[in-house]
Image (cartoon, rainbow, N blue to C red):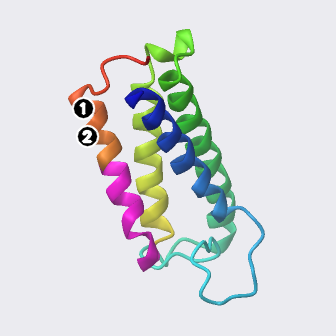
Amino acid sequence: MAATAFGVFLLLHGVIHLGWVSPKPADPNYPFVTSSSRLLPFIPEKVLGPLAVVLVTLIVVSFALAALGMFGVPALAQIWRLPATIGAVLSLIMCVVFWHPWFIMGPVLDLAILAVVVTGWPSHAS
């Protein structure tokens, strides 16, 4: 049960990153902006857009593979920690590059995922 719940969490955490590559509303306060970087303003816009697409794709795929491992897919159940780690690290990078104060929970969740990976919990998908 815990493995399945954690798998759902991983899947949802990955999917939320699609906000960066989805159509943007007219709201100027919308946080998922990839045309500029608050923390790395020297990166040009022509680099940021493609970087966002690559990062989001890798994050979503990584967390989806980790989730499938948590759901008990045989080949992935043994290696789910690798894609979970990749997804969490890339998500942290995404949050740094495209930082918005609303994203404070993103890095906290990524660090929690890394803590789960390091501690070895859950020990196996069930």
Q: Which residues are magenta?
A: 100-111
Element class at badge 1: helix
Compared to 6, does 30 lie above or below?
A: below
Residue 86 part of the magenta-drawn span: no
Residue 6, numbered label: none
Q: Name the residue rendered at 59%, 87% in the picture.
A: 29
Q: CA distance from mark 2 to mark 1?
A: 5 Å
The amino acid on which the numbered mark 1 sits, given as a three-letter code, is Val
Q: Nearer the viewer, residue 26 or 39?
A: 26
Along the horizontal axis of the image, is 121 left or right of 68? left
Q: Are marks 2 and 1 in contact (CB under 8 Å)?
A: yes
Residue 102 part of the magenta-drawn span: yes
User: Which SS does the magenta portion mostly show?
Assistant: helix
Residue 115, numbered label: 2
Image coords of residue 47 (percent x, y): 64, 64
> Which quadrant of the rendered structure holds the N terminus?
top left
> Which quadrant of the rendered structure holds the C terminus?
top left
The amino acid on which the numbered mark 2 sits, given as a three-letter code, is Ala
Element class at badge 2: helix
Location of residue 36 by image quarter: bottom right
Q: Name the residue rendered at 66%, 56% in the picture.
A: 18
Kindly identify which residue carries mark 1.
118
